[in-house]
Amino acid sequence: MQIKVNGTSYDVDVEEDMPLLWVLRDELDIKGVKYGCGVAQCGACTVHIDGVAMRSCQVPAADAVGVEVTTIEGLGTPGALHIVQQAWVDHQVAQCGYCQSGQVMQAASLLAENPNPTDQDIDDAMSGNLCRCGTYPRIREAVKSAAAKLQEA
Amino acid sequence: MGKIKTYTRRAFLVGSAAVIGGVAFGFYMVKKPHANPLLKDLKDGEAALTPWVKIDAEGVTLIAPHADIGQGVRSMQAMLIAEELDVDPLAVNVSPGDPAPAYYNTALATEAVPFMSTDDSFAAETMRDVMGGVIKLMGAQVTGGSSAVPDSFDKLRLAGAVARETLKKAASQQSGVPVSALKTEGGAVMLPDGTRVPYEDLAAAAAKLEPVTDVPLRDPNEWRYIGKPQQRLDIVAKSTGTLTYGIDLEFDGMVHATVKLNPRQGGELISYDASAAEGMRGVKKIMRVTGGVAVVADNTWRAIQAANAIDYKWGPVSYPSEMEGHWDLLAGSFNDDHIDNVWREEGDVEAALSGADVVEAEYRAPYVAHAPLEPISATVLVTDDGVDVWTASQLPRFVQANVAGIVGVEPDQVRLHNQYAGGSFGHRLEDEHVKRAAEVAMAMRGTPVKLTYSREEDFAHDFPRQISMGRMRGAVKDGRVDAYDLGIASPSVQASQLPRQNQVAPPGADRQIAAGAWNLPYALPNFRMTGYRTDGLAPVSSWRSVGASTNGFFADCFLDELIIAAGADPLEERIRMCQEPLARAVLEAVGEMSNWGSDLGPARGRGVAFVESFGVPVAEVVEVTNTPDGIRIDKVYVAAEVGRVIDPVNFDNLVKGGVVFGLGHAMNCEITYSDGMAEQQNFYDHEAMRLHQCPEIIVRGLENSDQIRGIGEPPVPPAAPALANAIFAATGKRLREMPFNKHIDFV
């Protein structure tokens, strides 16, 4: 089957029910997408499918055909940071950092839909993403400053 | 400059300590310097000035041997070296280096001895030094016990200073300019005429010199990095998904493995039937490993699917199958046969309690999992040339020894490439997953084997935090706490943990059974604190803040009960009773920060707690609202005394994270066993705190002490008791068992 990730189409020969997470990580070597739980409890595997944040551990490979998959590598790069990534750097959100790919993807999706979220909107959108290090206060601040930057832009 | 004197004095003390029996000889032996690990591979043109700085044609490499498990310690170590070496930490190489005995951790030893952290008597200092010798003898390169900062603060600055002065000496000899006329900046020696001589160009000459060791450390007012906000070295990579963790590694020809081990911890595999798994797509090998079965495939998911398709017959466990049996063992330990140590005995508790109106309580704390978000993994390659291991470990020397034992080589033939970890909280002090990976890799010589635990497997085999029980009695008199008799029964974590590393737990009492409870800083007229050791429980491991995570809850909450029984104010009374100035200062600070005593309005409450762990006094005030749907945590104020805040940004982040960790697990988490197996399998039944429950957290670091301390663990213990005390204030309901959600709802 053919799967399009970050604008590039890849031919992959996998079971229809292999989760997109493992297609990305072990077949395509796209490692910014993280395995944390496998059951949509942690959000570390969050990608955008046609612009909407989804848990890639719950997307069977067959459902990833014919859509645009964006991973954190496609959102921005160290040399060309996405506005959300810039906010994550400015606030030094990360500790271990393992959840942060998913947090950034979730936040980017939130702000794309709702550029001026309330505290409640942020709580609702971001509470599916677990951070075991407890960086939540900085995640809130970074989402807000990314939103403010988007307002200026 | 005083710090270098401390080194000299300790060296002298150590020499003089030869009088104290058998330990002294060992200590003398271990005072011989360990081999410098950077010397053995040095090529012409390279100089290893100290074990922490390496300079070659590729530039300056700072060696940061403490494992970065998320706490930012690699950046911190680089910053300390750079402060004296005059390099930009973002512009040089920073490497975890090769594990080596020279990287023994002296600061951890200072917490392994039974003296108050404030006790600097000769006996206490000597004992700490001797324990340092023992840890040095073991060559233990440990990341743990919030010890990286105190271990590194002098050593790494000194390393940077020695390197700088030796490079200047080399530059002086080359240029004929006296050392006093040379300056250093940006990784180069500057001559008076403005000529810039990069350190790299001086490496070969410096290698031939005796290192300049008579170096004063810079005065704090000259510091450019320490105490100022820094950018973590890993922050851009961690914000862009470009940091490679151990679980992300790929090598040519690598295979993906997973295991299923007896979910009854430590039990045997009796038999298995893999017929359903053998034909599954991508499966390359199914083999027995210690305690279970490994599946090797061409993709992690396929390996996990196949492992789940195998039919296993598991053996029994040695600990009680059901929780009732665990609690019975603890409850049966409060007697003379199980006394591990009487840590405090002041006044006459029995006399004070007799005839008094005695307040009694029993407190409980459950097993809790570490569950770092990156599941544990290890990649191992066995060849004729030795063994390569890629994993994240807090005990790399032990990993080397354990893998060497399995493969049948010498520890020095095991090259450990320590990785950035996606969290740990103590989990990566264990290395069972590395041992299993080594067993598979030995059966597949020449093929790199990456072994990854599924989240479910990680939960099943997370040697959890100790289960624990407190039994207290107390009495009040004339509006004050008069008597406090505090007993805590717990397994010895190190007695469970160290044998898995082929180490024997040190003889004598286990300080962690009493940590956070025996060292209350209060002048209580009658106080007794007794630690009871409970054997026969499930295997446990060090969990962020170890004993204090449970003991702090017991000790502080029951003190709160007594203060309230006495009719006193919880904060004012703690301050009044406090006899340690550093502890009193954090209590006063948190009172001022939270505007303690002000009216919070209806259905609200605040609680204060104080716990000292790893030498760091921490006070926290929690404010809650009792809403119709449950308790909402509104704000947390934290004051912590660390001597010096190295990086205010990382400090703030770590303290807040510690509070979230402490609160989240106290509210929501336990590991329970049924049929000998952990009942919690994934984050849906052990999730700790999510963002919507996270309060606003206000942090202050105090710098009154002349002892520098680490902050990774100490914010954790006061969070649970401060929350329980706040809930009592808001609702009148006293919570004596974690997790609190067994007894009250949270929104």
Image (cartoon, coloured by chain):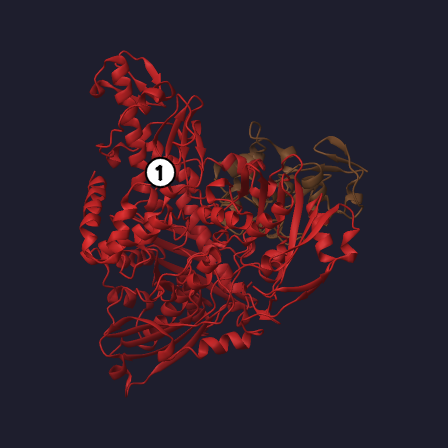
How dense is the environment of label 1, judged by Cα within 10 Å: few (below 14), some, or many (20 and up)?
few
Q: Quadrant of the C terminus of chain B?
A: bottom right
Amino acid at the residue labelled 1: Ala
Q: Is residue B259 left or right of A140 when viewed as pictured?
A: right
Q: Position of residue B634 (x, y in %)?
A: 47, 58
Q: Position of residue B520 (x, y in %)?
A: 30, 65
Q: Is residue B333 in view?
A: yes
The colour of chain B is: red
Q: Quadrant of the N terminus of chain B?
A: top left
Say above or below: B576 vs B145.
below
- Identify which residue is drawn at 54% across, 77% down: B324
Q: Nearer the viewer, residue B221 or B543?
A: B543
Q: Secondary structure at mark 1?
A: loop
Say above or below: B445 vs B269.
above
The colour of chain A is: brown
The furthest residue to the bottom = B355
Q: Is residue B299 left or right of B552 when viewed as pictured?
A: right
Q: Is residue A151 in view?
A: no
Q: Label 1: chain?
A: B
- Identify which residue is drawn at 59% across, 31% down: A77
Say above or below: B558 vs B230.
below
Q: Where on the picture, by quarter, is residue B511?
A: bottom left
Q: Nearer the viewer, residue B444 or A143?
A: B444
Q: Position of residue B603 (x, y in %)?
A: 47, 68
Say above or below: B622 vs B705.
below
Q: Where on the picture, by quarter, is residue B4?
A: top left
Q: Nearer the viewer, residue B141 or B657?
A: B141
Q: Which residue is mark 1?
A: B35
